[in-house]
Image (cartoon, rainbow, N blue to C red):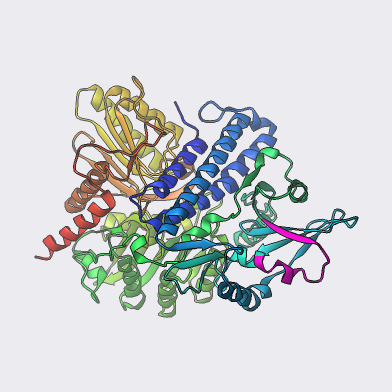
Amino acid sequence: MLISRELSWLVFNERVMQEAQDETVPLLQRLRFLGIFSNNQDEFVKVRVANLERREKNKSAKNKKLDGNLSTVELQTKINEAVKDAQQRFEQTYNDILRKMEEIGIIIVNEKQLDKEQEAFCREYFANKISLQMVPLLIRKSVKLPFLKDRRIYYAVKMTTHGRAANKYAIIEIPVNSATPRFVVLPSHDGKTYIIFTDDIIRLCLDDIFFMFTYDEISAYTFKFTRDAELTLDTDVSKSILEKMEKGISQRQYGKPVRMVYDREMPQDLVDIISRKLGLKNKENISAGGRYHQMKDLMKFPKVDPKLEYTIQPPLLHYAIEPYSSVMDVIKKGDIFLNYPYHSFNHVIDFLREAAVDPQTDAIYITLYRTAERSKIINALINAAKNGKKVVALMELKARFDEEHNIESAEKLREAGVRVLYGVEGLKVHSKLILVWRREGSRQKGYVHVGTGNFNEDTAKIYSDFALFTCNPAIASDAAKIFDFLENTYKHFETQKLLVSPYNMRTTYEDLIDKETENAKAGKKAYIYAKCNTLTDDRIIEKLYKASKAGVKIRLIVRGACSLLPGIPGESDNIQAISIVDKYLEHARLMIFCNGEKEKIYIGSADWMNRNLNRRVEVAIPVTDKKIRETLKTFFDIQWHDNVKARDLSSFANNYIHNDAPRLRSQTALYDYYEKLNMENKK
């Protein structure tokens, strides 16, 4: 039995909303979880819903059954119902949080609730900051609507004139950027904090924007819409991948609108005009919502009271790495394991900075998927090139929604003398791999990093990821083969230790699952413990079901979409599955196989998804160091026994795991565990 990936993903986002509804979560953090939920929902529509729209128009694919034995139309219907239902719960949760905020003196006001001082402040704020960015667009029946970007908030404006004169209509974009954030803190003298949406400052000043028109009434209603995010690349073989990507990004801006959400107070004539101008004909894709949209901006709600936010503990330095010392000297003594955000990502930056200036370092190779806006990783690579090192960086241009940023970073690297590779035809490079070659005596020694998360110092503060450093010669040799393939994609290669998709990763994982099945049938001890973000690959799931029937004990920690249903009698009753949603985004991948009591443990960049195993370059590394193996097993055990933020995936209801065991919140317990490890190893 396979559950629809799309419906399972929506259930995952419900778990995010659960955090917003959880009264034990700090109040402003609950608001931020609503922002995360909204952002997730928007991306789901932009990618998955748009994909189904295209599938419905494809005659050969339209009638094929999808996971869950659903047709495209049946799945679209279920998705529309789930999205609308979630939107209603979102609004209920949002209003509940606002009431609780008001009780403690944090009040969101609109333009009709301002005192004289606040109104004067808003009008001055509009004149000095917002009005300069205002570009009203008049709507005329016979004139095509000027191009509107999605992922923005718009006002649909109606100017009503009593009598014979026709109504006038317009659209204005609500500017949200560093100069004009979505939320503005207002002056106050009563000890309370008043905050207003930028939307309402504009609503207050509508007469100032449309002063040149004559009307009796003017009103404005928010709406937003989502375009298809599919990136179509030119097939012209004479163009480089960089040229194709730049053209594809430009064309994607004009993708077909697939969904519109509007203020339910908007008059029907205005709804009809906007939806018609956007080319939205399917009424199922046009939804009434609340007064405010683009609520992902809640993630950036003003930090008005630190007591109402999560306390983020400072990242720990690894016990073996002293400040201002050589990271490579430490790796030379033994493998180093890091788990962000409990450990500091600065260790990775310091590793690259050291390689950039080290006289004995000859070359640096790295794969880049998503980097920080002001990336210290990029700066370290540029410095290395300036210092005469050979630097080869594969910049994956097809990282969804980061394409433009990656093109800019690639240009900076190229201008500094870095050899930039732009990906592999037909494959997306998603691996988190670094190889540094260093002259030591008469030979070259390779230092390797294999991780589960991006080389991004910003997301490393909130994403839970693994990284392993080693100078194992066999691993370095494998890494060199991978980079040789990325530079010369016609070359075939085989690795000794590293698992690489789309080559030997799938077959290795499938063989290991099969071996557990055989051992269970033979009466031997057999288990599989796996942690990943997504589990939707049908072949892996079928093998896990088969293993369960044979008696293999399977424990799964899956943050997001999971197409496997645990606990089905006779099918998956030996499978247990949980999901953890908490203040850090669970992003690490870990696979543990009993293997006849000679455990095999891997960490890597790939989820158990078809795309990761078949259509991406992913890398996983076997963990052989005894201490690190024990650390990873303890990590899994701590997460498995979470009874505060873990959910039971055998149920789609309110599925928090609460039991009689002492309360254990894994993300807090893991910080304590690594802090204790530091103390024990520094004695």
Q: Position of residue 421 (x, y in %)?
A: 51, 62
Whether 407 is among the magenta residues is no
Give how far across and how far down residue 461 sits, in percent. Answer: 36, 62
Residue 593 vs 300, above or below: the answer is above
Which residue occupies the foreground of this view, 623 or 283?
283
Query: Quarter holding the C terminus?
Result: bottom left
Which of the pair 173/41 is nearer the observer?
Answer: 173
Q: Is residue 36 left or right of residue 531?
A: right
Of 363 and 162, nearer the camera is 162
Residue 185 seen in the current view: yes
Q: Residue at x 40, y 28 (%)?
A: 542
* Residue 370 visible to an observer of this rendering: no
Counting every numbered tag in the picture gives 0
| Residue 212, percent from left and from top | 81, 71
Establish if 39 lies above or below 557. Answer: below
Please tell me which residue is depicted at 39% across the width and 56% down the height of the picture.
Answer: 27
Quadrant holding the N terminus: top left
Residue 215 lies in the magenta-colored region: yes
The quarter holding residue 647 reads top left
Q: Residue furthest left?
A: 683
* Residue at image point 35% right, 66% down: 306
In-image side of 249 versus 389 (left or right): right
The outermost residue toward the top is: 570
Provide residue 151's location: percent of width, then percent of height.
61, 57
From the viewer's perspective, is residue 7 above or below residue 210?
above
Which region of the structure is painted magenta?
Answer: 204-221
* Residue shown at 77% from the left, 60% from the top: 217
In the displayed structure, does residue 111 sit left or right of residue 30?
Answer: right
